Image: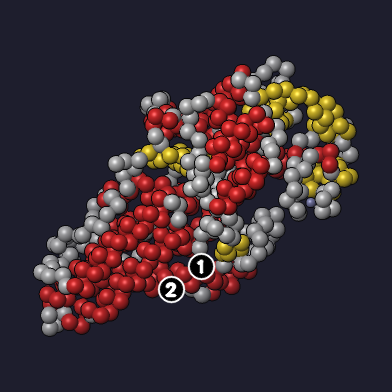
Amino acid sequence: MSERIFIGVAWPYADGPLHLGHIAGAYLPSDIFARYHRIKGNEVLMVSGSDQHGTPITIRAEQEGKKPGEIAAQYHQQFLDSWQKLGISFDLFTSTGTANHTEVSQDIFLTLLDRGYIYRSTVSQPFCPRCQRFLPDRYIEGTCPYCHATGARGDQCDACGKPLNPVELIDPHCRLCGTAPQFKDSEHFFLKLSELQGKLLDWVRQQTHWRQNVLNFTMRYLEEGLKDRAITRDIGWGIPVPVEGFEDKRIYVWFEAVIGYLSAAKEWAKRSGDDEKWRTFWQKDGQAKSYYFIGKDNIPFHTIIWPAMLLGYNDDLNLPYDVPANEFLTIEGRKLSTSQNWAVWLPDYLSRYDPDPLRYLLSINMPETGDTDFSWREFFRRNNDELVATYGNLVHRVLTFVYRNFDGCVPTFDDIDARGNELINKSLAVFNFMDGFLSQCNFKSALKMAMTVAQEANRYLDEKSPWKIIKEDRQAAANSLYVALCVISGLRTMVYPFLPFSSQKLHKFLGFEGNVEDDGWQLHFPPPGQKLPSPEPLFSKLDEGLVEMEAGRLGLPSS
Ligand SMILES: [Zn+2]
Ligand SMILES: [Zn+2]
């Protein structure tokens, strides 16, 4: 029975390059999940896009003397390039800068207003007398009233993590010119979260299948009581507020970015030629399950605010089924910091290395239930010891030996002994175990499970030694090599969601046509006599020198 799976992935701010923290947090797990469901024959829609609005982008643009749209377009292009090189298989990666997104956002805004979930209220906002402008969020800085760190922003203190209001800042000043702000009245729209609290609590209480950290965090947040939140800002960059008298204001970025999940599905439908197709993934009768892949800092927006908006907007749209938020990735034992350049940047990685070794390391070491660390030493070790020596070597020694000794064809077997059957049965059992793990977004365990099959197959070959016995008993050698080829064929499929590039290579090396995905989630025995191409290594060994070289790049000022 085919399932329908909607996958929404966090929208990256188009104000800088992606780093490994983003990849381990949201993009790699969502891609593994999408590929797993596709190869099983399920219907998948995976969407995201670049977040073009918000003060991080306008501030960057002002610093670089560019227009915010130029900055956003530049990084959007870079994101698309990174997805293609890393194999992140979005069905649509769009942006919040489209006319479609504006239309869908304004519709949700106006509907919530109509239904009484949005209201107007006048608030006192910081205003810079010198720049003659209001100073939302990141445009105002000062000293944190809680931890006394300097450089706390109007919306948050990065040093202690506390959310702030501009009035709370000690010694506040305009980030652009340093002048102390005045406070002026300004009328804004507020989302009535307080009214949706009861409905949300009822719904969240039923989500017992969520990860413990996600559920606990959400319950704590709800039990503290939801406060209404301002959803417009005194700023010129963003989606216009569709109400007269609000021409100088914009819809706040956190309100409209989450709407991207719905607007992207609509855009995808339009592009497919069937404008209504989004409904099967969004309306309740489509019976789709919606998954949202995000980092843990994004939990409240996806388990509270977005569901609240959906509940208020329309009774017929799917709420999130699961929000498998990941914890953080540290780099060489230290907290990742983009401002200190303590990060491994994705475009930089992809300019020097293949995608699969990174996908492998970040999967087998995924921060699913706690923070994990990325180090170049481990990258080097896992590539050489696990991908090359365990999996790659298994594939390469079998394929080269078969190619040379059996006329470049899959050998014909006449008998599979108990040991061979045991190994094949183990592969079948692993398919089942992986199914359970993958469907519950337990990616680390699934990949570890697959790797035990490669280890087992290496032991099997060491016992059978077809390279030794071929002289005395050619048929016995053919039998054990056939078993090995079947298991390798299964591995190609099992690790496909994690290592799509090498799986596709292996698919061809085994003489199959087309794509791994078309072959389905099964242990497919290569037919005896199937022609094999001349084999090549699946992975490349890395030089140990990279450990020191790459560690040396960390923390240097970026060029
Ligand atoms: Zn603080
Ligand atoms: Zn100023």
Side of 307 where 389 appears, left or right: left
Marked residue nearer the N-terminal end (1 or 2): 1
Q: Say if residue 82 shows up in the picture.
A: no
Q: How many discs mark residues in the rendered view?
A: 2
Image coordinates for residue 134, horizontal then vertical, percent: 80, 31
Q: Where is residue 372 in the image (x, y as percent from the top left)?
A: 57, 62
62 to the left or right of 442: right
Quick one: quadrant of the C terminus? bottom right
Q: What element carries label 1?
A: helix
Inspect the image, locate mark 2, and give the three-letter code of the amino acid beneath it: Asp
Residue 526: image location, x then y, percent: 20, 60
Question: Pointer 2: residues within 10 angstroms few (<14), some, or many (20+)?
Answer: some
Which residue shows up at 44% across the image and 61% down it? 445
State the residue in front, 368 or 394: 368
Q: In which quarter of the image is residue 412?
A: bottom left
Label 1 and label 2: CA atoms lie apart by: 10 Å
Task: Report the residue marked by disc 2.
Answer: 385
In the figure, is residue 338 to the left or right of 486? right
Q: Residue 379 carries which label?
A: 1
